[in-house]
Image (tube, grey):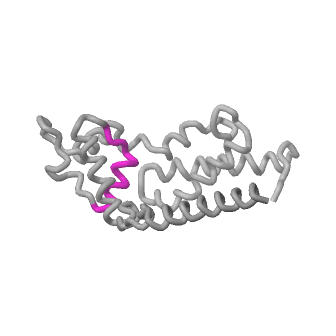
Amino acid sequence: MFKKFQRFKAFLVLLALFTLVSVLTPLPLLQPSYGATLTAAAQAGRAIDFIKEQYLSGQTVDGFAAYILELAGEDLSGDAWKREGDHQPLRAKMDSLAGLLGDGNTLITYIIATQNSDGTFGPYANEYCTKVSLQALAAVAGDTTGTEVNDRVNKAISHAVSYFQEGYRSGSLTYEP
């Protein structure tokens, strides 16, 4: 019985010690979290500053990052986006690089250029590539009205539609709504 009492007494001492230590120890979780106090605008500002710092130190900025920066209201044509020793800011460099492609090299002209003689598109010349290409051309057909590419778009659409019509009539293509 004496041993049971000693064990119980040791347990009470440990429990009291644990309670005393836990009450007197300050909780670090009660301190404010610095990351949670940033607003969306502050986070966007930090991201812009980071990208700008990387660009000015020699890193490149891709087109998507530049697009996001402009959506965020950043003026890429200002002096803040000019590297030391450069004469042009980032926006002017991007415009000059885009000008190298010319206006004639677009996704529309690429799709039209990959149309095969039977009306299909691409190297696989199947109905799946043709459906996607036809859908893309049909989506932009209204936007090309009055441009030099309008006739080419309409001819490519007609040729692709003929491919499907002939395939459905002959039974080589199955119609699945």
The N terminus, quarter of image? bottom right
Identify the residue shown where x is 30% and y is 47%: 51
Q: Please provide percent x and percent y for residue 129.
A: 67, 42
Q: Please provide percent x and percent y for residue 112.
A: 55, 42
Is residue 77 rendered magenta in the image? no
Give 32 or 100, whichever is nearer the viewer: 32
Is residue 63 rendered magenta in the image? yes
Give 17 or 36, whichever is nearer the viewer: 17
Which contiguous range is marked in magenta?
Answer: 60-73
Q: Please provide percent x and percent y for residue 172.
A: 85, 42
Identify the residue shown where x is 53% and y is 57%: 141
Residue most extreme to the front: 2
Identify the residue shown where x is 67% and y is 47%: 160
Does 165 sit left or right of 89 as displayed?
right
Residue most extreme to the top: 123
Q: Please provide percent x and percent y for residue 17.
A: 54, 61
Identify the residue shown where x is 12% and y is 39%: 87
Does 53 sit left or right of 157 as displayed?
left
Give 96 or 72, whichever is nearer the viewer: 72
- Above or below, 115 against 6 in this view is above
Does 175 sit left or right of 49 as displayed?
right
The C terminus, quarter of image? bottom right
